Image (tube, rainbow, N blue to C red):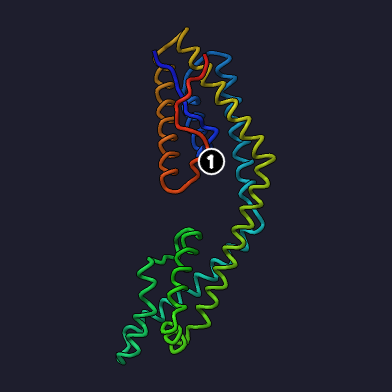
Amino acid sequence: MTQITYYAYTKYDLALLFTLLTLIDSRLAELETENAQLIALRQQLHQSLARYDVAYKQSTKSFLTETIGQKDTARDKVTKVIEWVARYWTELPDEDDAVRGRRVYQPFKDFDYRRDEAMMAQNAKWDNIAQVFAQPDRQADLQAMGLAALVQKANTLTQEIEQLMQQRQAEGASYQKGEMAAARQEAEGLLAQVVQYLNALLLVSPDEALEQTAQYIQQDFNKTEQQYQQGRKHGKKDDEGDATPVEPEA
């Protein structure tokens, strides 16, 4: 007899928990049932998910987002010019000029700098490039190529972006203590109720559709836990509980 077991999902971050809730909401929507209590719980969970979605989007929204985007666009233009000029210098007939071009262009290749990456990745990679450009011989190259001022502009923009992103994160964290926390708590409680009721039905009146839905939901729990564990291995917080499955009471 199938029984759904789930992990301690209260340890998941906001985005991962939202993914899990969305998966289970979809499973329940596809289940054909005339059970009034299950239908009511399914509707409550769906409505709670909608409130969670609104609160989550609001928690990540900030008036700073537009400013960050503008500065990122400006940095893209500046770094593109630096990279293009350096690349063209590599093709100049004078060998000294070509060597300067190669020395300035090489860090873009070494750090695989791409302007279509996430801003955090761009920040980190430009910081690395800036450290290379800060070396005396690279400073001389940049001066000779007329790029020193543009590099300083890119450095300044990157610092401003990093500061604004930290400020936006702090604002989001503050919001999460209120509306987001309430929305999350409600969704977590309803999810537990749904699983407990499904397990009870599976014991007293199982059918093929219910069994299949339970198996799919179990897969969703397992997949989400696997993603959480992979995230821990890649540097996310690992002090938010263990990975021991929790068997809900029927």
Query: Which residue is under mark 1?
Result: 13
Q: Nearer the viewer, residue 229 or 206?
A: 229
Q: Is residue 80 above or below residue 212?
A: below
| Residue at horizontal 37 percent and vertical 77 percent from the top | 105
Task: Report the number of discs.
Answer: 1
Rendered position, 81 above or below 17: below
Can you give x and y, in whole percent of width and height, for residue 230 in the image? Answer: 40, 42
| Residue furthest front as drawn | 239
Query: In the image as oriented, which residue stretches furthest toward the top?
Result: 204
The residue under the point 54% across, 21% down is: 194
Rendered position, 55 above or below 147: above
- Place of residue 111 in the rendered image (x, y in percent of width and height, measured from the top left): 38, 67
Q: In the image as oriented, which residue stretches furthest toward the bottom?
A: 94
| Amino acid identity at mark 1 | Asp
Label 1's element?
Answer: loop
Residue drawn at point x = 44 percent, y = 34 percent: 225
Neighbours of disc 1 within 10 Å: few (<14), some (14-19), many (20+): few
Residue appearing at x 59%, y 58% in the figure: 165
Spot occupied by residue 169 in the image (x, y as percentages of width and height): 61, 53
Among the 4 quarters of the image, the one containing residue 190 = top right
- The one nearer the camera, 71 or 243, is 243
Residue 204's x, y, as percent? 47, 7
Quadrant occupied by the N terminus: top left
Instruction: Locate residue 112 relative to residue 194 in the image: left or right.
Output: left
89 w.r.t. 114: above or below: below
